[in-house]
């Protein structure tokens, strides 16, 4: 009897309905993201996502009634993850301009030179004026623009003007985005890393010209003239 009682005490608790729902949705979303990166939107079928997740088609449609509903949630998961990664990178980058620039370039490459960006780009290009295209752009604004702003604020805290910090961040992202798009034509290339490093030196020069000490010196010269 004691052994029976002990085994019952060790018996794992049954999952709640909410936990089962969450786990099922996570399986579907992981599978959708993986298949979207391989097949893109046009080649994605919800039945394939369900089978890849080890679930029935009925389970898939119960949680995500349409293909677009599933795709949008999958994209939101990608954006959520990349946003969290960027914010962690900012928090651990240090406070010097060079440390922040190094981290900014790495973050831009991590997103724009990856399948995460190509997945989102593919969804935008399906039909930019459709409901799907509109919602994809809304997700991009909700998740990617705050990342851009967080990098700007980090450089401002390092002592740079908001205008110059914004220029550097937007140019960094634009350059990495261009390399990401070029991959669709020519495939991945090592030159992207080299050219991003060249831009890193240029960005450091731009921000050095915008340093607090230099602005203070310039202001003092103007006052004495």
Image (cartoon, rainbow, N blue to C red):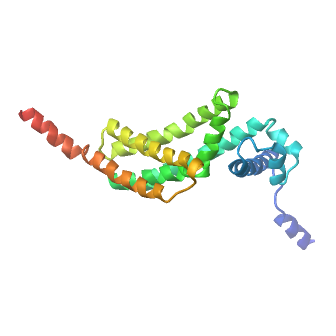
| Left or right side of 215 for 161 | right
Closer to the camera in the image, 157 or 58: 58
| Left or right side of 219 for 82 | right
Closer to the camera in the image, 186 or 21: 186
Query: How many numbered dots are placed on residues in this image?
Result: 0
Quadrant (top left/top right/bottom left/bottom right) for the C terminus? top left
Residue at point 91% right, 69% down? Answer: 4
Residue 47 location, quadrant: top right
**Residue 182, image x, y percentages:** 54, 47
Residue at point 67% right, 31% down? Answer: 127
Closer to the camera in the image, 99 or 185: 185
- Mark yes or no: residue 85 visible: yes
Quadrant (top left/top right/bottom left/bottom right) for the N terminus? bottom right
**Residue 51, image x, y percentages:** 84, 52
- Eyeballing the image, is 24 above or below 125? below
Q: Furthest residue to the left?
A: 225
**Residue 133, image x, y percentages:** 65, 31
Q: Furthest residue to the right?
A: 1
- Eyeballing the image, is 183 above or below 7? above
Q: Furthest residue to the front?
A: 186
| Left or right side of 111 for 23 | right
| Left or right side of 202 for 87 | right
Residue at point 15% right, 42% down? Answer: 217
- Mark yes or no: residue 94 visible: no
């Amino acid at each position: 009897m004691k052994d029976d009682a002990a085994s019952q005490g060790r018996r794992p608790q049954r999952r709640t309905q909410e936990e089962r729902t969450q786990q099922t949705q996570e399986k579907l979303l992981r599978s959708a993201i993986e298949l979207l990166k391989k097949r893109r939107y046009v080649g994605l079928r919800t039945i394939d996502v369900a089978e890849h997740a080890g679930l029935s088609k009925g389970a898939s449609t119960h949680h995500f009634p349409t293909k677009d509903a599933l795709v949008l949630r999958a994209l939101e998961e990608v954006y959520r993850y990349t946003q969290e990664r960027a914010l962690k990178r900012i928090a651990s980058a240090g406070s010097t301009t060079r440390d922040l620039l190094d981290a900014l370039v790495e973050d831009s490459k991590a997103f724009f030179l990856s399948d995460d960006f190509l997945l989102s780009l593919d969804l935008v290009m399906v039909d930019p004026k459709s409901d799907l295209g509109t919602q994809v752009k809304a997700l991009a604004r909700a998740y990617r623009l705050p990342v851009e702003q967080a990098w700007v604020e980090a450089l401002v805290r390092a002592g740079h003007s908001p205008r110059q910090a914004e220029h550097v961040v937007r140019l960094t992202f634009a350059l990495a985005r261009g390399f990401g798009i070029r991959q669709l034509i020519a495939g991945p290339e090592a030159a992207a890393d080299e050219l991003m490093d060249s831009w890193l030196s240029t960005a450091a020069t731009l921000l050095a010209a915008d340093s607090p000490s230099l602005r203070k010196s310039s202001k003092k010269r103007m006052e004495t003239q």
